[in-house]
């Protein structure tokens, strides 16, 4: 998946399924690039909100976004230096400025070079993603509706407040997977609970 992404053959911004259903049996994460001056606050925010923001890895050094062969996530890819650079090896990147989305780009490093962006040093964070346990659900014979439909998972912004840290705060965002009440729900809860670093079991079951 990283190799396809690096060469522009996999772009989740234009794919309705995103990366759901890909890399079966492997850990998937979301990426966040945070300005160095806010990195410690963001790490604290993740620790204080470990269910919605489970921190899997972070870069040990800060880099400019345009740097090549930078942002190595060592825990996710131990010993793998060929395909492990967070600013080139994801399918797509959404760029925010002052809290507003300004671009969706397939290669963050190339975008930063072409736009002559010089916004200082950044730290990359890998946040656990529930796509990781979808293959386990399927292996248990549990249907994953959005995978079958070739769509991205439904997501909702809740009224559940998060613990703030520095500039970071807000309310919890959740994904939803429908299962039949009874045995299917119980099995889905048991499977997802085995993956605490990928959000784990559901925060709510039933009719809202």
Image: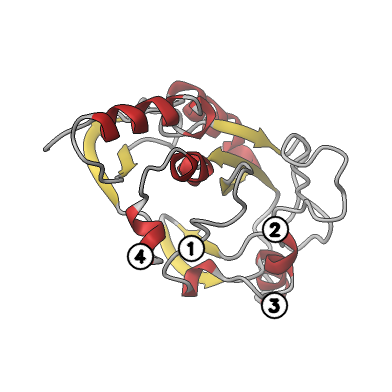
Q: Where is residue 120 in the image (x, y as percent from the top left)?
A: 69, 53
Q: Which of marks 2 and 1 is in front?
A: 1
Residue 25 visible in the picture: yes
User: Which of disc 1 and disc 2 is earlier in sequence?
Assistant: 1
Q: Distance between the residues labelled 2 and 1?
A: 18 Å
Q: In which quarter of the image is the N terminus?
A: bottom right
Q: Where is residue 38 in the image (x, y as percent from the top left)?
A: 57, 38
Q: Do the residues labelled 1 and 3 touch (CB within 8 Å)?
A: no
Q: How crowded is mark 4: few (under 14 residues within 10 Å), some or many (20 or more)?
A: few
* Left-right relation of 90 to 137: right
**Closest to the observer: 57 or 203?**
203
Residue identified by numbered label 4: 149
Q: Residue 87 carries which label?
A: 2
Q: Which of marks 1 and 3 is in front?
A: 1
Residue drawn at the location 35% of the way across and 49% of the way down: 143
Write down the quadrant of residue 205 in the picture: top left
Q: Which mark is residue 114?
A: 3
Look at the numbered disc 3 and give the secondary structure of its residue. helix
User: Which of disc 3 and disc 2 is earlier in sequence?
Assistant: 2
User: Which of disc 2 and disc 4 is earlier in sequence?
Assistant: 2
Residue 5 to residue 128: above or below = below
Q: Residue 18 carries which label?
A: 1
């Amino acid at each position: 998946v990283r190799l396809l992404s690096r060469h522009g053959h996999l772009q989740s911004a234009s794919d309705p399924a995103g990366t759901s259903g890909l890399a079966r049996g492997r850990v998937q994460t979301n990426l966040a690039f945070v300005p160095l001056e806010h990195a410690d606050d963001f790490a604290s925010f993740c620790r204080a909100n470990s269910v919605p923001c489970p921190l899997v890895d972070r870069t040990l050094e800060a880099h400019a976004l345009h740097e090549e062969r930078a942002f190595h996530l060592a825990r996710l890819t131990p010993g793998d230096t060929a395909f492990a650079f967070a600013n080139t090896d994801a399918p797509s990147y959404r760029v925010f400025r002052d809290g507003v989305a300004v671009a969706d780009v397939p290669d963050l490093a190339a975008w930063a070079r072409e736009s002559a962006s010089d916004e200082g040093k950044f730290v990359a964070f890998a946040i656990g993603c529930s796509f990781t346990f979808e293959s386990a659900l399927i292996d248990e014979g549990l249907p994953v509706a959005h995978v079958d439909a070739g769509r991205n998972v439904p997501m909702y912004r809740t009224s559940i407040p998060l613990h703030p840290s520095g500039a970071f705060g807000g309310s919890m965002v959740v994904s939803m997977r429908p299962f039949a009440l009874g045995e299917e729900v119980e099995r889905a809860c048991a499977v997802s609970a085995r993956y605490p670093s990928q959000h784990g079991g559901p925060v709510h079951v039933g009719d809202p």
